[in-house]
Amino acid sequence: MKLQDLIEQVRDTFNTAIESCHNVKDIQDVQIHYLGRKAGVVTNLFKELGVSAVEDRPSLGQQINDLKEYVTKSLVIREQIITEKLEKKTFVDLSLPGNPEFIGRLHPLTLIQNEIISVFEGMGFEVATGPDIETDYYNFEALNMPKDHPARDLQDTFYLEDGNLLRTHTSPVQIRVMEKTEPPIRIISPGRVYRKDTPDATHSPVFHQLEGLYVDEGVTLAELKGALLAFAQALFGQEMKIRFRSGFFPFTEPSVEYDFSCIICDGKGCSTCKDTGWVEISGAGMVDPAVFEFVGYDHEKYTGYAWGMGVERIAMMKYRINDIRLFYENDIRFLEQFS
Ligand code: PHE
């Protein structure tokens, strides 16, 4: 091969070699390979000069010198690029904003539950809880629902193989507390309850209730109405009204169903309240003397009121949500809206 071509070839292979240098050691290897004093590829080109035609020597010598300079400079530049990159990697800019951490938040049902609790705590009620898996005795029997009572229907209740069941309401907590405590009693009991309902916009097989119970000497239904009204106004504003309708529960006598005035239309009538101006909340009443007998209270001495409350229903009113299933789908876009 002619020296002229050889010079070009060396330049090409050098260009490839330097591109694949990724650290200082690579650079040093390439440097020795091309510029090594004894057997460097470029160094050897100078030796070839001796066997080329005399008249070509000045020009070829110049070209080899240029190549040597090119190789030397390229090695320096490549080394700078590599070391700067390394430095960049380890350089920490403390003035940059950090990556925002994803912060979780409370579920809307927990938020509303906490709010309900704090209102009733302000009236002197204390939180009491009971198990989700209940016995027939606490969920039905002691609440004055004997064996043949229709509320025990297999169609409504999730029974477990061992004969226990998933509580269908929070009322069993009334019994558990009264069994252990003498009046006066003022408790609220929030928690999950279960019913074999097909999910739709207003039904979910698991939902939340908040039970209230007040037992003492001389407790009246009027006080119950006062407490529920005070609650409604604390949560939804002074213009709220409540009403009692007659109802029936085996564990209260008399029993009522209670409604809040519709906050969507201020009681004028809309689709939410089905044009009645009222939204049904839950049931309540005076504790049935039969229940006091189960827990060993003297029903001549004590009276008490109790109420239930659908937590989802309150949350739906408060946050204007029209489908209960949203609470259970855990769509982050829904949950993110509450804090
Ligand atoms: N436990 C009843 C229900 O789930 C509500 C209720 C509670 C009624 C307390 C009266 C007294 O529907």
Image: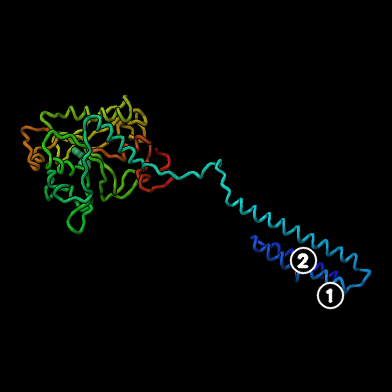
Q: Quadrant of residue 228?
A: top left
Res 13 seen here: no
Q: Nearer the viewer, residue 249 or 109?
A: 109
User: Which SS class for mark 1?
Assistant: loop
**Few, some or many C-alpha atoms within 10 Å of disc 2 (few <14, some 14-19, many ≥20)?**
few
Q: Quadrant of ligand 1?
A: top left
In the picture, measured across the screen, residue 329 lies left or right of residue 127, that is right
The answer to whether the residue bearing label 2 lies less than 8 angstroms from the nearest atom of ligand 1 is no
Q: Quadrant of residue 1?
A: bottom right
Give coordinates of residue 57: x percent, y percent: 90, 68
Residue at image point 5% right, 33% down: 300
User: Which SS class for mark 2?
Assistant: helix
Q: Nearer the viewer, residue 80 or 304?
A: 80
**Few, some or many C-alpha atoms within 10 Å of disc 1 (few <14, some 14-19, many ≥20)?**
few
Residue at image point 41% right, 47% down: 331
Give coordinates of residue 225: x percent, y percent: 21, 29
Give coordinates of residue 171: x percent, y percent: 19, 42
Residue at image point 38% right, 39% down: 321
> Which color scheme does this rendered protein use?
rainbow
N-terminal of the pair, mark 2 or mark 1, is 1
The residue tagged 2 is 12
Q: Which mark is residue 1?
A: 1
Is the C terminus in the top left, top right, bottom left or bottom right quadrant? top left
Q: Which mark is residue 230?
A: none
